[in-house]
Image (tube, rainbow, N blue to C red):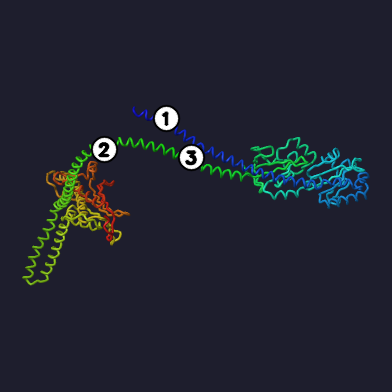
Amino acid sequence: MASEPTAAGGASARKPRLLTYLCVLLLIPLGVWSAYRYTERSGIDTIRDAAAHRIDIYENTLTSELARYTYLPSLLSLNPDTVRLLQEPGTAALTDKVNRYLAAVNRGAHSNTLYIMDLQGKTLASSNWDQPITFVGMNFAYRPYFLDALAQGHGVFYGLGTTSKEAGYFYAERVYAGGAGGKVVGIATVKINLDKIEPVWKRGADTVVAADANGVIFLSTFDPWKYKSLIALSSEARASIAATRQYDAPGALEAIGLVEQNRINAGTAVERFASYVDLRRSIPALLGPRFLAVSRPVSGTDWKIVTLSNIKPAESAALNVAVGTGLGLAFVTVFVLFVLQRRRIIAQELATKSALRRLNDELERKVSRRTDALSHANKSLKVEIAERKNTEAVLKSTLQELMQAGKMAALGQMSASITHELNQPLAALRTLSDNALIFIQRGQVPGAQKNLEVICDLTERMGKITRQLKRFARKSPAFLEPVSLHAALANALFLLDARLRRSEVRLVLPVRTEPDVEVYGWAEATRLEQVLVNLIANALDAMTMTAGAQAQARAISASGSESGSGSMPATAVSAARDYAAGELTISIARDADDVSISVHDSGPGLTDEALAHLFEPFFTTKDQGEGLGLGLTISLSIVQEFGGALSAHNRAEGGAEFIIRLRAATPREPDAR
């Protein structure tokens, strides 16, 4: 309960800090946005000022070009032949003379075409009279420049020629008979080609267009835009243009797709194309750059000039400034947060030091009490460690003695057979030695020599038995070395040779794929032989007990059926002997890193209880007095000391199988321990 006010106080103290951090962090995007907007606006203003200066030059270029030819219609009015032709149309000589005059003036003025029309709009004479496409005889009464000149005294018009299909600027004036103020007899018109202005405009970095009152572009540094409109035209405007055949060309009057995004003032706006088209490469894209559109009316006309300047430099500069501002604000924010955090840490450290002093005093008191308890526990622990060491030493010594006792027990079990093996040679030695004396007395040296050779063989056999028993019985230190599994198995079988022959068990030994190849494992030779002797003896016991019981039953049955007496007849003895025969299979195998020896008998196998307690000390399935139950326990301990494993299981075809697994070795391999 005491911790609740503290937690509530901590939560209330954290809220102001979080609000402070949030406000500081919000300054970064706000500052970045402000820096970007300010820098971009400044860059746009710079681009706008430069564009305004250049648009003055573009306008002067256009107006100067128009002003160069405005005198020509008045000049034609001063020629008396022109006036006479308008008063007396149809005179061939006069028409030819005026045609040649107009051609000469056109060449001198470098205009496109000069021609004279009567009051009905018919062309009576033209400077292109001798060209394949000539205006002579054509009627242009529908053209706005003719109508305006006839009604107001002069008219201007820009459009495609209906005859030549060449775009041009048309300037027309009345022709008076008898000078100005006289009777109007016709219209004089000059056509000017303005296309030569476009190469001059293309020298700049901007995209420049000139558009008429309807917004139709007739001059452009980007050729695909010619005769298209800046904005979508109304149906009335389209009808008016169609009536005058002003832009009679395929694809004309289509909108270029400029969309205004931000208007800065009356003549300046930021625009983007709805479907972007690269102005230099004519490559469409979904979204393109933004342009600054600056427009200026052309003085003396209803036209306007528009420049489109890419504002990418302003955006890049604004982005760089925004990034720099963001980094700077981030640094300042981190510094402020660091200062705030540092102040909080210092306050926490002061509070922590105070709490630590209190805890330290309490800890010292607890340490003093615990030190006394630990000192007492340490003394007790030392005594316990000493006792454990003594116990381990005794246990190790006992285990060694048990292993030796196991060897001696095995020797005890084999003593009767070994005594029999030694008694037979001894009896033979006695007889042979007596015979040898008789042969010597008789002078029969070859017979005595033959008896002595037999005596030598018998003594060698008896010596081999005693040497093997001595080596098996002696104590030896656990020193691992590469041991031949075939040799160890041969030595173990030698010790059990008499018992194997007496038991009449059929022995199946491992077959070597290559006679000179030995299988080696890390072990100690004598103790490995002890394990093999124990496993083979156990297998013989298992098969002997089972076969004996079955043979006894077989014998009793045979006895009862033949005589009905309690004595066992010869047929019963023979049946018991035949039935006692079993099969003992021993195999040696090698894997990549391991070697194994398996001992498989044809006995009854192991019960579930035996498998559960097989390697426990003093557990045995033999009759009382026939075993201590330590053989398998000692064998397991020996194999584990070798770094191997001993396992047992029942085979599906019957009988038990014990497998010894050892680490593989080679004769020249050093000790791997």
Residue 495 in view: yes
Tell me which numbered mark, 1 or 2, is placed earlier along the sequence. Answer: 1
Q: Position of residue 83 (x, y in %)?
A: 91, 45
Q: Are marks 3 and 2 in contact (CB under 8 Å)?
A: no
Q: Position of residue 644 (x, y in %)?
A: 26, 51
Residue that appears at 37% across and 28% down: 5
Secondary structure under the numbered disc 2 in the rendered image: helix
What type is the residue that disc 1 sits on? Answer: Ser
Residue 37 is left or right of residue 645, and the answer is: right
Cα separation, mark 3 vs mark 2, equals: 44 Å
Cα separation, mark 3 vs mark 1, equals: 24 Å
Tell me which numbered mark, 3 or 2, is placed earlier along the sequence. Answer: 3
How many residues crowd around disc 2 within 10 Å: few (fewer than 14), some, or many (20 or more)? few
The C terminus sits in image quarter: bottom left
Name the disc covering residue 333, or none: 3
Residue that appears at 23% across and 58% down: 487
What type is the residue that disc 3 sits on? Answer: Thr
Name the disc covering residue 364, or none: 2
Name the disc covering residue 12, or none: 1
How many residues crowd around disc 3 within 10 Å: few (fewer than 14), some, or many (20 or more)? some
Q: Nearer the viewer, residue 454 or 185?
A: 185
How many residues crowd around disc 1 within 10 Å: few (fewer than 14), some, or many (20 or more)? few
Residue 619 in view: no
Q: Residue furthest top?
A: 1
What type is the residue that disc 2 sits on? Answer: Glu
Q: Nearer the viewer, residue 277 or 554?
A: 277
Residue 586 is left or right of residue 60, and the answer is: left
User: Up-down: is 453 above or below 500?
Assistant: below
